[in-house]
Image (tube, helix red, strand yellow):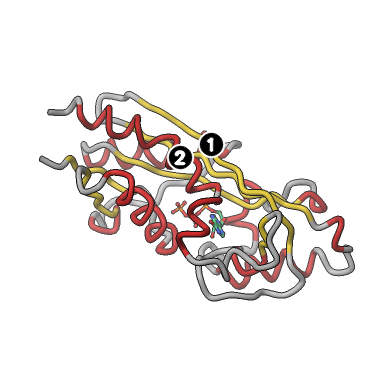
Amino acid sequence: MSQRLVLATRNQGKIIELRRILDAISQGTIELVSVDQYPDIPDVEETGSTFEENALLKAVAISNATGLPAIADDSGLCVDALGGAPGIFSARYAGKHGDDNANLNKVLVELQGVEDTKRSAHFTCVTALVMPDGRKVTKTGEFHGFIAHVPVGEHGFGYDPIFIPQGSSITSAQMSPHEKDLRSHRGISLRAIAPHVIELLGTLG
Ligand code: ITT
């Protein structure tokens, strides 16, 4: 019998990635349900000051509201030349939550004139699993690279068109979804949390 797990995000690009990576790991033993199926649940304010706090805030709220196990991630791009911004504030950075073009253009404008060797950046992702009885697990993943000068590529979402992974000459939006999953912050943290998801959901009988 498969166990239900709620994906605690309304970011459609992220839902596609979470489903793809978790489906491959769980091989049908977990029924992934999007929080979009619960339209009455209000959006969770990301008031924490770390990725981990925000991931837990989202997963706890959705697990409490649905009575089901929930998995949430909080992720973001940290640009060295901007002192780590947009970082955990990236969703609010451009003033328009969910407007990927506004977000990435703001980073490009702020990096105008910054030379290639100073355009290093990394994505961080903290994934949180929260069980209805309060048990919790969190796992982190990082993805290092550089900020491009212009957006290129159609895959992925968010800042992918301006992020060139370390050792690569293409952006993560030019990588195939599988290639991105193998290296990305989200892929790393989800593969780390997967054994705990399978174990804890297994205890629900
Ligand atoms: P939820 O809180 O509903 O999960 P969100 O869009 O607010 O979705 P985050 O706070 O986790 O997502 O992400 C902050 C920003 O970082 C947001 O603009 C994302 O699009 C971007 N981002 C996160 N992961 C990314 C990835 O793998 N590639 C490109 N951009 C990413």
Query: Considering the numbered disc 1 on the image, is that residue within a helix, a strand or a loop?
Result: strand
Check disc 2 and report the residue beneath it.
127
Check disc 1 and report the residue beneath it.
140
Q: Nearer the viewer, residue 74 or 149?
A: 149
Q: Nearer the viewer, residue 126 or 143?
A: 143
Drawn side of residue 3 relative to residue 11, left or right: left
Residue at 49 percent across and 48 percent down: it is: 186
| Ligand 1 within 8 angstroms of badge 1 C-beta | no
Asked whether disc 2 touches disc 1, contact meaning CB atoms under 8 Å apart, the reply is yes
Quadrant in the picture for residue 148: bottom right
**Tag 1: amino acid:** Thr
Q: Position of residue 108 (x, y in %)?
A: 75, 68
**Tag 2: amino acid:** Thr
Residue at 58 percent across and 75 percent down: it is: 153
Q: Position of residue 80 (x, y in %)?
A: 78, 49
Residue at 32 percent across and 51 percent down: it is: 24
How far separated are the C-alphas under marks 2 and 1?
6 Å
Q: Position of residue 146 (x, y in %)?
A: 74, 58
Residue at 48 percent across and 48 percent down: it is: 187
Drawn side of residue 65 relative to residue 163, left or right: left
Query: Considering the numbered disc 2 on the image, is that residue within a helix, a strand or a loop?
Result: strand
The mark nearer the N terminus, 2 or 1, is 2
